[in-house]
Amino acid sequence: MIEAVQEAQTGTKSAVVRDARYYELKREIEEHYYDECEMLDTRRFQEWLDTLAEDLVYFMPMTFNVKFGTHEQKERTRLEKDMSWFNEGKWTLTKRAEQIMTGVHWAEEPLSRLCRLVTNVQLTAIEKNEAGQDEVSTRCRFLTYQNRREYEEYFFAGQRYDRLRREDGVWKLVRREIHLPQSVLLAKNLTMFF
């Protein structure tokens, strides 16, 4: 997976052949992403959590301003080695969703109004895992709009590098790496899901 993310980040040519199977899988993944946006925007968190694999890795590195020529090595923090905005699994995401829905979550009372867009979806790997299940790696762009109270507005734009696995005919998110191109977080919090 790390290699697929690095390939996606550097823009090297993917080994994926863009044939009829590619476009059928791409359509399925795009529909999965649109459904995911709808579930999150309408706060149907339990339905969304059901689309996550039990072995999920949900990672959002921090981004730094670095000297020219060192971007690939130093621009983002590393999983399990450096500090990050998110380094979570399904259990942690479940607890975060449950906390939001208690109504006593300081940063989400009143609840934010969110609108998510996902675009530029491309498949970067199509494989079968050891159990014979389909696994697909993707890269895409996202834009998330957040409004809180009367005047608080935030826009989050970035890239996502995902790995999805088909389990019993349903796509499950196995890994999500979120790249937010802000070296300083411009919002007051990161309570939403990307």
Image (tube, rainbow, N blue to C red):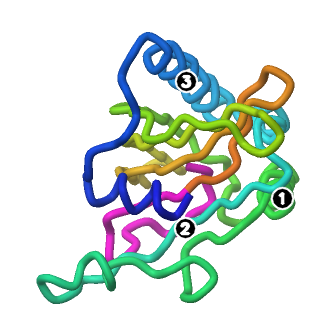
The numbered dot on residue 189 is 2
Alpha carbons under labels 2 and 1: distance apart: 15 Å
Instruction: Give whichever of discs 3 and 2 has the lower sequence position.
Output: 3
Residue 88, relative to residue 124: is it above or below?
below
Residue 170, relative to residue 16: is it above or below?
above
Q: In this view, does 185 lie to the left or right of 40?
A: left
Q: Which amino acid does label 3 sit on?
A: Tyr
Pointer 2 with pointer 1, Cβ within 8 A: no
Labels 3, 2: front one: 3
Give the magenta part as a residue range.
177-194
Residue at (62, 23) in percent of width and height: 35
The residue closer to the viewer here, 182 or 8, is 8
Q: Where is residue 67 shown, x and y percent of the image?
A: 16, 89
- Predominant secondary structure in magenta? loop
Q: Quadrant of residue 80?
A: bottom right
Residue bearing mark 1? 99
Pointer 3 with pointer 1, Cβ within 8 A: no
Q: In which quarter of the image is residue 44?
A: top right
Q: Is residue 188 left or right of residue 12?
A: right
Q: Residue furthest left?
A: 68
Residue at (44, 77) in percent of width and height: 62
Residue bearing mark 3? 34
